Amino acid sequence: MPLLCSPHYSGSVATLPPSFMAAFIQEKVNHRQQELNPDIQPDELVHINVPSNMDTSFDMPRLYKAAFYPLAESFQVRYTSKTVCAYQVLDGQPVLVLVLFCQEYRARHRGGQLEVDRRVYMHTVLLV
């Protein structure tokens, strides 16, 4: 279950626990901001959180499997659904400026070997 939908979560995007992915994106975004504007103020920096990072799957339609994946052993397609939020803190309050929903497909089996094939598809972007 996504963290923000959990009945045990009460708070804002600014209080979500840190993650490696969020820290990586935040560092890259803020580095680029400082390259573009060396006089950037701390309150202008962008903060990143990943409130949802969930493994899930769906069953592909039979005709699709027959046409594109005839050798696949299963109809099931596994992927990781992620939500990435970008916000800035204005007057002490987090203001959400971007929400990115994406799906990451990453595993293929060939000849008994697992090949890592990371493909990230941007599903939806919301500019708030």
Image: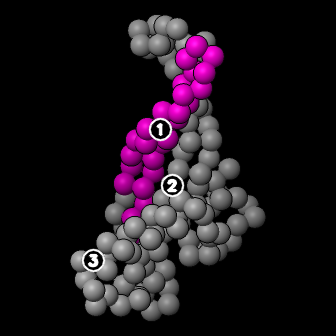
Q: Nearer the viewer, mark 2 or mark 3?
A: 3
Q: Which type of secondary structure does the marked residue at label 3 adopt?
A: helix
Q: Is residue 96 above or below residue 112?
A: below
Q: Where is residue 116 drawn, in percent x and y?
A: 53, 33
Give neighbour class at mark 2: few <14, some 14-19, many 20+ (Cα, 10 Å): some
Q: Is residue 78 above or below residue 95?
A: above
Q: Amino acid at mark 2?
A: Thr
Q: Amino acid at mark 1?
A: Arg
Viewed as shown, does residue 37 lie left or right of 59?
A: left
Badge 1 vs badge 3, beta-carbon distance below 8 Å: no
| Label whose residue precedes the other's in the sequence (1 or 3) | 3
Which one is nearer the viewer's eye here, 42 or 123?
42
Residue with the mark numbered 2: 83
Q: Give residue 17's quadrant in the image.
A: bottom right
| Label whose residue precedes the other's in the sequence (2 or 3) | 3
Q: Residue 113 lies in magenta, yes or no?
A: yes
Q: Amino acid at mark 3?
A: Glu
In the rendered structure, find residue 118 and report the number of the disc placed on it.
Answer: 1
Q: Which type of secondary structure does the marked residue at label 1 adopt?
A: strand
Q: Is residue 46 above or below residue 66?
A: below
Q: Residue at x 47, y 38 (%)?
A: 118
Distance of label 2 from label 1 (alpha carbons): 17 Å
Q: Main secondary structure of the magenta part?
A: strand
In the rendered structure, find residue 35 and report the number of the disc placed on it.
Answer: 3
Distance of label 2 from label 3 (alpha carbons): 27 Å
Span shown in magenta:
96-125
